[in-house]
Image (spheres, coloured by chain):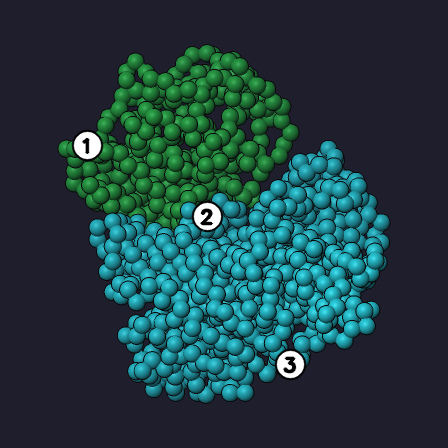
Chain colours: A cyan, B green
Amino acid sequence: MEFNKPADQNLFDRSKVVGKPHTRIDGPLKVSGQAPYAYERHDVVDGQLVGYPVGSTIAKGRITSMNTEAAKKAPGVKAVVTTLDIEPLGIWDYNAARLFGGDKVEHYHQAIAVVVAETFEQARAAAALIETSYDVEQAKFDLKSEFERLQGTGEPDTVGNFDEAFAAAPVTLDEVYTTPSESHAMMEPHASIVDWSDGGDMKLWTSNQMIEWGRQALAKIFSIDPDRISLESPYIGGGFGAKLWVCSDAVLAAVGSRAAGRPVKLAMPRPFVANNTTHRSATIQRIKIGAAEDGKITAISHEAASHTLLGGSGENAIAQTPYFYAGDNRYIIHHPVEMNLPEANAMRAPGETAGLMALEIAMDEMAEKLDMDPVEFRIANDTQIKPGNPMKPFSDRHFVECLRRGADAFGWADRNKTPGGQRDGNWLIGHGMAGAYRGAPTMKSGARVRLKDGSLTVETDMTDIGTGSYTILAQTAAETMGLPLEAVDVQLGKSSYPVSSGSGGQWGAASSTAGVYAACVALRQQIAERLGLEDPRFEGGNVVDGDMETALVDIAQGEELVAEDTMEFGDFKKNMVHATFGAHFVEVGVHAGTGETRVRRMLAACDAGRILNPITARSQVIGGMTMGTGGALSEELALDQGRGFFANHDLAGYEVAVHADIPHQEVIFLDTLDVSATPLKAKGVGELGLCGVAAAIANAAYNATGVRVRDYPVTLDKMIDKLPAI
Amino acid sequence: MKSFSYERASNAGQAAARAAEVPGAMFVAGGTNLLDLMKLEIETPRHLIDVNGLGLDKVEETEEGGLRLGALVSNTDLAADDRVRRDYPVLTRALVAGASGQLRNKATTAGNLLQRTRCPYFYDTAMPCNKRSPGEGCGALSEGAFSRQLGIIGTSDSCIATHPSDMAVALRVLDAVVETVTPSGATRRIPLEEFHQLPGDTPEKETALMDGELITSVVLPAPVGGKQAYYKARDRASYAFALVSVALIRQPDGSGRVALGGVAPKPWRRPEADAELPNGARAVMARLLDGARPTEENTFKITLAERTLASMLAEE
């Protein structure tokens, strides 16, 4: 099915299941420990051995020798494979790091060996016995000096004449902001069981957000036919983009399985999540804004840099700037800087997360310069087209309504407006807000449905990374087939199922529900033809046509009806910009003595099309707000600039927000419908909640103290010298 | 993890004797730190002596009017003890500021004193560390290293690690005494002040304990009264090590005691700094942190210590 024009009124506008608050259908399995994650799939193949990785201890250079004698003789060891034993493996299209093979070291904890043994303890102990010698090469890890060198170079995306407009603007801002490298730090580290025992077909039970990408990637990495590869990833303990890719857990398990002639399972040790897999790059961002006295932006420049391995793209912090706010003169450019650090790649809302951390502080600073309310300043610069391109309208944009609804619900008008002017005991109280913007792409997505005895099974290689895919796909199928939710069974994450959008870029929910809808429509047509009906309704478990009602359970008398289809999205979508919008409002307390910042309450108002399930959608948004709290106040992969590695590579050192950091959270969904998004008029919401929230917290900390921090995370050391005397 | 043998001890004196006799032996109680370190091969004991069965898990009153805290009393139980809450509130506050509920359920009084530093260069065995491998050099003192969390005073050119405990900071301000049994069966009393050692050029030697010596209890002198407080400044609200922590006992006449955590290789207290309490936080810190040698990344701890104490003093 092709979605080739905006959706008319359809069954989802009269929905009984979609849009209703259903708790997640996989919840009971998860809370009772019955949803098996990759490393726990003991029953899928016999004879599993355990692999343990060895990582490089330098950032750049060549391995001159590896001594594996002691490791090979260690108890229980079945195989040891070093990176010197094999030719460099292939690198997949969307990645930059070589996962294994050859003597070249490009980053710390790059995988250089795998030890396979009977038990985990044996493999780990033997891995520690491998001795490696290197020729170390010098490398630089100073993003700041690279940014200074690159400023003003390259080919910017321009509209009008920024320099002239900025020079002429009566009110201007020119500031530099920084964001640190961040780790996905999901609970479940990367883990895979691989059976490639005979070097023939390769079977993986893994934790991966994108099943078909994974199959294609492995095919390229090992130069084998993708049809010889199968993947399963039904449950995923968090990914946030770290599991968009095949990582070295899968590659080492495959190599180990081939060498040992038995299936091998391997989970990344926690430090490898920081230094072996991908992360969000640090950024430096210089933002210049010029505005007229009435608050209309006339000029905006956003120049950013981030680090990346050769061939990668870093963190594109300018992603939102061509779209979010009006302004006739623009200068926008991102400089990826090559650096021998682990691969910088997508982490939840890549681009916008880091970009809005900076831009939304800049907007707060501009509002102050203009003596405008920051909400009104943003409203004054709303745009319904891509700035500079009237031919490119937004498909559906209600940013102003987010700002107004959010401000009302939060009590924004009643806040103290004078920085440092409100106190509660030892705590300085501040309020801040920020806008949120995140693209709403859709991706081709397929599904298969099977109807037997009135029960429907949905099969698609879509994944549920904790987001609620199982539930919203069941709701979509139930709605389309007129069945109760309980009559639908959803099966996900197998490469033998039709290829879906997968989970990433907040495209999963919108795309995969459309795919399931397409498959259900195909089944409806098949049933209609079978019954000789033109256009029957499907409701209450029945096929209804005039006075005639046939129960779905009776249609095929024990036979299984199967239909499959893929939703494709037509070119008409390219004529407009699809995005989601939001507004964050935050109250913080900053300890007047220590400078510690703690969030006291937070609220987000979101415009993200039809909300398919308010419970799972809210869960996504408050999860984003929680991640943004960590990003604002404590998360930083601490770079050792001398050696080039992230030193705080565990969950004690890399401080994500904990329960005690998270206060009352409120989420408001605007009841919007984006008719040109999907047949369900839905857009993603999984990343929107993270976008802008860190800046709202930083702005609130400024309002509390009068100290403006432009370098994340907003930790006490960055303001303690500037706080008033006690 | 290296292979090791294991035994359960049933008598404290015999446990100490065994520890001195068996090469590479270590005691294990809650295991909340030791097992992590063994998995990373930072600690590689060849033999573990499990002391959990020694019955040292009671809080008892002493003849002097104080409390004897058994070495195996869990941090959770100690924090919740009515007598501790009433007479030594700084200890309860310090305990509940540490770790997480789950860890405090397993962590013991003696184990808390003996936990190792959380310096990232100590934890990454690919990095040089004089504490882990004497003579190897200090990763945290090299150009471009990450030292924000590390020590500012009492450190040396060979090590700038801090002692991570909250409990020990409170015990220090309470003038606690560590009681031990030695391998020969003798008992010993070590004031907490002398228990933890400064690194000098032997950062691997962290305490005054001799080979095999086992902590049996920690004694709190009779209550000193006063207003007691513990403030732990950190980047997140829970489950984070202190950037700076302050244990404070203040008497109605303005005199009192102050100890700091998060700044030194041991709970940090100086009598001459205590004497400055009536003159305010700046005067206290001028004495307490005299001679500090912070890195560029952790200079802020000096200001933070002073401002934390100042806000505690201002609270009355």
Label 1 neighbour load within 10 Å: few <14, some 14-19, many 20+? some
In terms of depth relative to the viewer, which is nearer, A697 or A340? A697
In terms of depth relative to the viewer, which is nearer, A362 or A453? A453
Tags 2 and 3 in contact by the CB under 8 Å rule? Answer: no
Name the spot of residue A700 as percent of width and height, x first: 34, 61
Quick one: label 2 or label 3, which is nearer the N terminus? 3
Disc 2 target residue: A658
Per the model, the C-alpha gap separating discs 2 and 3 is 45 Å
Quarter of the rendering occupied by the N terminus of chain A:
bottom right
In terms of depth relative to the viewer, which is nearer, A477 or A189? A477
Question: Which residue does the image show at 46% across and 51% down from the upper left?
Answer: A657
Q: Secondary structure at mark 1?
A: loop
A54 to the left or right of A686: right
Question: Which residue does the image show at 49% across and 73% down from the upper left?
Answer: A320
Say which chain tag 3 marks.
Answer: A
Closer to the eye: label 2 or 3: 3
Q: Secondary structure at mark 2?
A: loop
Name the spot of residue A284 as percent of width and height, x first: 45, 67
> In the image, is residue A383 above or below residue A184?
below
- Please state which amino acid type lies under the numbered disc 1: Gln
- Please state which amino acid type lies under the numbered disc 3: Lys
Residue A135 visible in the snapshot: no
Name the spot of residue B101 as percent of width and height, x first: 45, 36
Disc 1 target residue: B251
Label 2 neighbour load within 10 Å: few <14, some 14-19, many 20+? some
Question: Which residue does the image show at 43% across and 24% down from the upper left?
Answer: B73
> In the image, is residue A611 above or below residue A24?
below
- Please state which amino acid type lies under the numbered disc 2: Val
Disc 3 target residue: A5
